[in-house]
Amino acid sequence: MKRLVLWSFLVFGLGASAAPAVFAAPATAKAQYRPLYKPGEKISLGADHYFTFGFDKPPKLGMAIMRVEIFSRDGKRDTSFVVKGDADMPSMRGAHSNGEKDYSLSAKGLYLMPVRLVMPGDWEVTFSFAKNGQVVFRGAYLFDL
Ligand SMILES: [Cu+2]
């Protein structure tokens, strides 16, 4: 009996101390999506390309434009990929999702997607890159608004 009491104390003790840590950890990206935290960083896209991502200006409540740029290793812009994505809040999955939509390709070769940031909190904007019909990379930008 004494053993059982000690055991349950341990379990509850651990549970209580672990809970705040889990809560404070960065939001979890969708399965199969690599979590991304740094806009502007160069991220490998297979062996021959890289991309960068970021909002056109610091995001605030309302409309924001996510932009993705793809380059070959030698620095030439590449527009041969199809980029799709969505925006949602990990803490309330599905509440703000529009389903995966194509980023549109601008005349300058930027991939753009309007994102409606309707409330403060944790957000996630996803990117999936396909080449010749094959998805080669999935990433999710996680940030707090
Ligand atoms: Cu929400």
Image (tube, grey):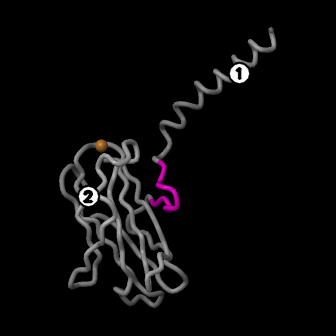
Please indicate whether residue 3 sits to the left or right of residue 58 in the image: right
Residue under the image location 28 percent in, 64 percent down? 55
Report how many numbered discs are placed on residues in the image: 2
**Vertical position of residue 26 compared to residue 33: above or below:** above
- Label 2 is placed on what type of residue? Pro
Check disc 2 and report its element: helix, strand or loop: loop
Quarter, ligand 1: top left
- Badge 1: residue crowd in 10 Å (few <14, some 14–19, many ≥20): few
Q: Nearer the viewer, mark 2 or mark 1?
A: 1
Residue 131 in the image: x percent, y percent? Answer: 44, 83
Q: Is residue 125 above or below residue 121?
A: below
User: Sequence order check: which comes first, mark 2 or mark 1?
Assistant: 1
Q: Is mark 2 within 8 Å of ligand 1?
A: no
Q: Which mark is residue 144?
A: none
Residue 10's mark? Answer: 1
Q: Is residue 32 magenta?
A: yes
Whole-Å distance between the Cαs marked 2 and 1? 45 Å
- What residue is disc 2 on? 58
Image quadrant in which you'd find residue 42: bottom left
